């Protein structure tokens, strides 16, 4: 089967917009595979730190990424056959992911890896450039977002729910800085694809958002 004939739902948006949760639930509902592209950058940030590589060193970070064996299994993330799911979900690795993601050499190094996730019967991919760069031919493109205040509140409650320390003002500041980096980077900046559906979730539940995506996908077919 031609890879391009395999349907893709691309869900892009800023940090803490809820796109990961929505994407996973949509994938489960359709029986599709799932790509968390943000996790790839978290893994690279984690591996770079483990190897004492500065997150600002574009070439060294890309070279490090080329040596990594990254796998997603049963909602867990493995690096060189070791489960690092918890390690990469810290706020520190979130900041690291945002910093390494600005590097064009790294983004180029990860393109083929992301394309390999496009397998039958279909794929739901979430990130910053899924619909604009990685899967520009996606059958459905969604830009899922919410106000910075709403996203900060969600992240704050999420961290507290996990028993992790959290400071709302610090989270709000960090999200503003991430948004600025994501939108301002030279390579694959955070943009709304021209043919994407804008889905603002400030006043929507997760179920509402999932149902909206599923409705639009079914009516695209």
Image (cartoon, rainbow, N blue to C red):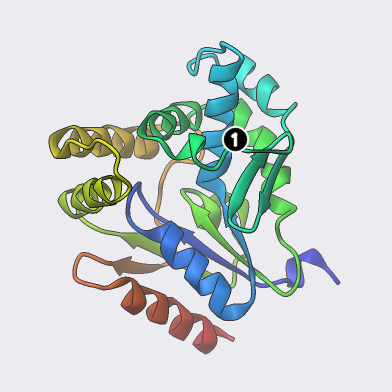
Q: How many numbered circles does the render carry?
A: 1
The image shows residue 19, relative to residue 99, as above or below, that is below
Residue 210: horizontal and vertical position, in percent? Answer: 41, 75
User: Looking at the figure, which quarter contains the N terminus?
Assistant: bottom right
44 lies above or below 161:
above
Pointer 1 residue: 107
- Label 1 crowd (10 A; few <14 / some 14-19 / many >=20): some
Residue nearest the viewer, comparing 180 with 26: 26
Q: Is residue 58 visible?
A: no
Q: Residue at x 60, y 56 (%)?
A: 35
- Residue 204 occupies quadrant: bottom left
Which residue is at a point 57% across and 34% down the rendered structure image? 43
| Apparent side of residue 131 relative to residue 135 in the rendered image (left or right) | left
Q: Position of residue 31 (x, y in %)?
A: 64, 77
Quarter containing the C terminus: bottom right
Front in this rendered view, residue 129 or 212: 212
Circle 1 — which element?
A: helix
Q: Is residue 161 visible?
A: yes
Q: Can you name the residue that lies furthest to the right here? A: 1
Residue 81 on image: x %, y %:
73, 38
Q: Residue at x 64, y 72 (%)?
A: 32
Percent of width and height locating residue 152:
21, 47
Left or right of 173: which side holds 102?
Answer: right
Q: Is residue 221 above or below residue 165?
A: below
* Residue 180, picture quadrant: top left
């Amino acid at each position: 089967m031609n890879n391009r004939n395999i349907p893709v739902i691309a869900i892009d948006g800023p940090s803490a917009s809820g796109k990961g949760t929505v994407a996973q639930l949509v994938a489960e509902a359709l029986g599709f595979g799932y790509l968390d592209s943000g996790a790839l950058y978290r893994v690279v940030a984690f591996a770079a730190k483990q190897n004492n590589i500065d997150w600002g060193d574009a070439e060294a970070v890309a070279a490090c990424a080329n040596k990594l064996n990254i796998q997603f299994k049963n909602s867990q993330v493995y690096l060189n056959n070791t489960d690092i799911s918890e390690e990469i979900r810290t706020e520190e690795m979130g900041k690291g992911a945002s910093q390494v993601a600005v590097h064009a050499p790294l983004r180029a190094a990860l393109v083929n890896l992301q394309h390999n996730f496009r397998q039958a019967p279909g794929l739901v991919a979430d990130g910053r450039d899924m619909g604009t760069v990685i899967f520009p031919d996606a059958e459905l493109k969604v830009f899922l977002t919410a106000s910075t205040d709403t996203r900060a509140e969600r992240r704050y409650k999420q961290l507290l729910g996990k028993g992790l320390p959290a400071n709302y003002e610090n989270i709000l500041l960090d999200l503003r800085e991430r948004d600025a980096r994501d939108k301002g980077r030279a390579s694959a900046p955070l943009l709304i694809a021209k043919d994407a559906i804008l889905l603002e979730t400030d006043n929507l539940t997760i179920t509402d958002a999932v149902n909206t995506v599923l409705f639009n996908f079914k009516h695209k077919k």
